Amino acid sequence: MIDLSFPTPPESQQAESFREQVRDFLATELAGRTPLQRVESWMGFDAGFSRRLGEQGWIGLTWPKQYGGSERSALERYVLLEELLAAGAPVAAHWIADRQSGPLLLRYGTEAQKQAILPRITRGECFFCIGMSEPDSGSDLAAARTYAEPVDDGFIVNGTKLWTTYGHKAHYMVLFCRTSRDHEDRHGGTSQLLIDLTLPGITIRPIHDLSGAHHFNEVVFENVQVPRDALIGEMGDGWNQVLSELAFERSGPDRFLSTLWVLIELIRALEGRDDDQSRIAVGRLAAHLMSLRRLSRSVAGMLQRGENPTLQAAIVKDLGALLEQEIPDIARQLVDTGRADAAHRDFFQVLHYAVQQVPAFSLRGGTREILRGIIARGLGLR
Amino acid sequence: MDDSRSLLLDTAGRLFAELRETPDDADAAWQRVAELGLPLALVDEAHGGFDLPVADALAVVRLAGQYALAAPLGEALLANRLLAEAGADIAEGRPTLAVADPHSPLTLNREGDRWRVHGRLPAAPWVEHAEVVVTIARHDRQNRLLLLDPDSLAATPGTNLADQPRTDLTLDLDLDNHRVRELPETLGAEWLFESGALLRCQEIAGALATVLDMTVQYASGRVQFGKPIARQQAIQQQLAVLATQAAIAAGAADMAVDAFHDPRRHALIAAAKARCGEAAGQALAIAHQVHGAIGITREYRLNLYSRRLWSWRDEFGSERYWQARLGEQVLARGADGLWPFITELGGSTEGARQ
């Protein structure tokens, strides 16, 4: 029998009382934020908000206190993340550092790297971007060509990274690159470097998305001299390190709550309607949300116990993207979008924003096809 | 998984595997299942049961779905539980249950020193094979368990798509006092309908696990264009989607099981049954596509599962029914109540561990 089991998600009274604390904080902090701002979800960037969250001790919530963390449980962190997302808080500034760069450094970083970087992340003062994709290397991550040539005192980096979200506002990048000329060794010749984005030779150029917004960047490295101590983990271990990041990246509430605010504004637009079509459609979406949230919380429990839920994380992300993408479509079936009604201005604004964002949901963090490939491998098919 | 749970599942699994070889003899199957005492799994020790945690007892129902067991084990589990709750003798043999449509409940009235019950119990499972049929009605703000004698009922026999017995019962009869027993306030007709939906969630989750297994195995063995079709990316991607549907159905069914004692079980079971039903449809479409023509033959085993799944998703409330019930609650809470609604239900798992 193929084992796709998701263990019962752990429960914690402590996490539930923390939820109230987070809600109180956000109610004050986000008062006056419009639905259109809230639907930006984890793409909303506000350095001031991240600093104030850091002051609460809520960035790096689970990290050791010696690095500025709060040593709280993974469950409390899950509650914090979902409450931030559900409230539409502008979390983009610190999101990547909190979700994957910080945990990567905690696991593989040198003591000096941890002491230098992690406390600044937890204070909401130090933002990260991810240097994985390249012009000729998207889903095929191992085809990355950016080359960090090992020299006596470090590395000389040349190459181009693409689709670098908030690279123009980040302080550091975790760069996935080749550190060997042996192209036969697709996986073994790769490493990860901690790149200070102020180094000479780095050029960051904007790429506007189809809505005209600037999240993406192209980051070009031209003979960038990087010190030896920028290496994260082991030389040649880049591929394995990246894979270990992905379960953290793929199973969280950010993988199914991106259009929650479309659903919220849809329910507002449906107020006063009393018809089966609305009940059935909204009930169906709620059923999907509730079921998927259970699986996602189950993966959080597995991560907390130090297990490696790569397969389960891929399942959550694949189902999550479908749900996030479906919500605007279903909303359009319930409200006549051919007749924009001034009374439902917020609804139309969040809908139109979301319609332009949803194609990204099954691309970012691993395309739908890559995820299904991972699941197929889990089934023993590849 | 602790020892008593795995012992129970191992024992039950061995029996179900054996019974799979003679799928048509329902009476023999039920006999064997009863000999193991499985229908008492949801009953506490004081009433002759095992005192198992609810989650363990209901795991046996998922296993029955996984093996396409030709006996109403889930129905018997619930019926025995209700008999025990009502202080009635546990039927050693074959109890089953029946539910009225939630929109037209039974009417129960006192007439002299007897009871009079009136109404319909559509598609009651396995009535012809049962010694007692239990159902729940309400009279004077009191839930009551009715113990019906199958031979005394006006019955129109039928089957579901999987040839499982489903009989329409029309009730218009007098009942002696010993056949009308008080039940606690929490155990009303709605509770029974929800619990029936929960059984079907478990069976759907079990059956989908087998459907996934069969389909992966078939694709790995079936050679076309010189290689197993499982080597084709197009097939791999479809099998991955099938796996996601099996996984979400199992997760949704777990959610329903954990809600067994939860006062908010209505919304949780609603979500679970709606999601399991949808997963069944999507998963079967892929399973049949990958199997090709062999999958649509009566001889090949896939139809044992697909016909059950197509039936189970309709029984005890279809997707449409439960989505509407859940949607009603969500809409009543309003836009700003959506997220609190979902997190409140996120829930206690204590219920099923009792």
Image (cartoon, coloured by chain):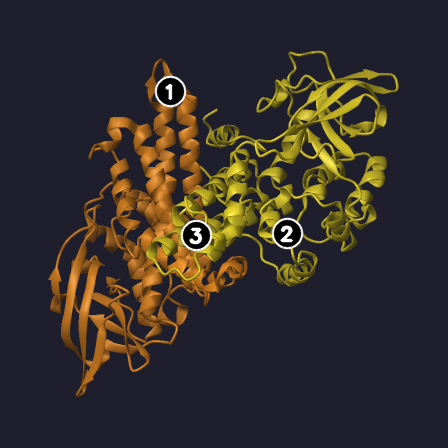
C-alpha separation, residue under disc 3 versus residue under disc 2:
21 Å
The residue beneath circle 2 is A84
Direction bottom: furthest residue: B112
Residue B35 appears in the rendering: no
Q: Earlier in the sequence, mark 3 or mark 2?
A: 2
Mark 3: which secondary structure? helix
Q: Quadrant of residue B143?
A: bottom left
Dot 1 amino acid type: Pro
Q: Which label lies toward us, 2 or 1? A: 2
Estimate the x, y position of residue A294 in percent, counting from the top left: 51, 51
Label 1 Cα neighbours within 10 Å, binned few <14 / some 14-19 / many ≥20: some
Q: Chain of mark 1?
A: B
User: Which chain is orange in the rendering?
Assistant: B
C-alpha separation, residue under disc 2 versus residue under disc 1:
47 Å
Q: Nearer the viewer, residue B1 or B212?
A: B212
| Quadrant in the picture for the N terminus of chain A | top left
Q: Which label lies toward us, 1 or 3? A: 3
Residue in the image at 72% along x and 11% along y: A181
Q: Which mark is residue A287?
A: 3
The residue beneath circle 1 is B228
Dot 2 amino acid type: Leu
Dot 3 amino acid type: Ala
Residue in the image at 47% along x and 50% along y: A291
Colour assignment, chain A: yellow
A107 over B330 or under it: above or below: above
Estimate the x, y position of residue B222 in percent, counting from the top left: 33, 22
